[in-house]
Amino acid sequence: MASTAAPGRLEIVREFVNTVEIEDASDPMSSSDELAMWCRDSGLCSDTDEQGLARLRAFREALRDVLETHAGEGEEAERWRALEPFAGQSCYRLSITEQGRPALQPEGTGADAAIAQIFGIVYDAVGAGTWQRLKACRKHSCRWAFYDRSKNGSGAWCSMKVCGNRVKAQRRRARQKSD
């Protein structure tokens, strides 16, 4: 897969969504130990139980569904509604940074803390205008999250060399069959 890093903390969201290789059917979140390592490495949470692991998986896929709309697949408002149960459980407190600015601090532990942190990053990215460029590959067997750095923001595949060429070749073969 192409690794098109997102700017700033939005990269954490891209990495979180990419914790599963759909084409390879491997899921690093399939055991608590691997999830704990990813959360610890990313700074999102240091522990979670099986229930938290299941919530993180469901949240990850609902978030990926929203990213698919950025590549032209599906209805965005409908996909956002699927995130509502996670949003409703996210808690924050307001604090003042060392620079004297207000900042939202996610509360909770484990999966709840990770979900709140990711929602905070998404909220900031929406405000900064970078959210729409974080996309999920349009190739349904891939769905890898990537940051679209194209000039006009029209990227649809994680990699034109891999997924883009495969999709275009499939379309060409289908046209040739129908002729």
Image (spheres, helix red, strand yellow):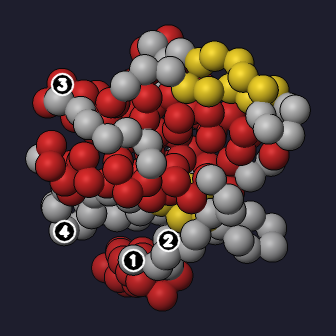
Is 115 placed left or right of 39 in the picture? right
Is 101 placed left or right of 170 in the picture? right
Give the distance between the C-alpha atoms of the residues marked 2 and 1, in whole angstroms. 7 Å
Residue 27 location in percent, x, y? 19, 55
Residue 77 location in percent, x, y? 60, 26
Element marked by disc 2: loop
Which of the two residues, 138 or 93, is positioned nearer the viewer here? 93
Which residue in the protein does label 1 denote?
Answer: 1
Q: Residue at x 26, y 54 (%)?
A: 37
Q: Do the residues labelled 2 and 1 touch (CB within 8 Å)?
A: yes
Mark 2, other Cα within 10 Å: few <14 / some 14–19 / many ≥20: many
Mark 3, other Cα within 10 Å: few <14 / some 14–19 / many ≥20: few
Residue 139 location in percent, x, y? 40, 64
Q: Residue at x 32, y 41 (%)?
A: 46
Element marked by disc 1: loop
- Residue lying furthest right in this view? 100
The disc labelled 1 sits on which kind of residue?
Met
Q: Residue at x 18, y 24 (%)?
A: 51
Q: Are marks 4 and 2 in contact (CB under 8 Å)?
A: no
Upstream in the sequence, badge 3 or badge 1? 1
Upstream in the sequence, badge 2 or badge 1? 1
The disc labelled 3 sits on which kind of residue?
Gln
Picture layout, residue 171 above or below residue 37: below
Upstream in the sequence, badge 4 or badge 2? 4
Upstream in the sequence, badge 4 or badge 3? 4
Give the distance between the C-alpha atoms of the residues marked 4 and 2, in whole angstroms. 15 Å
Give the distance between the C-alpha atoms of the residues marked 4 and 3, in whole angstroms. 25 Å
Q: Residue 158 carries which label?
A: 2
Picture layout, residue 62 above or below residue 71: above
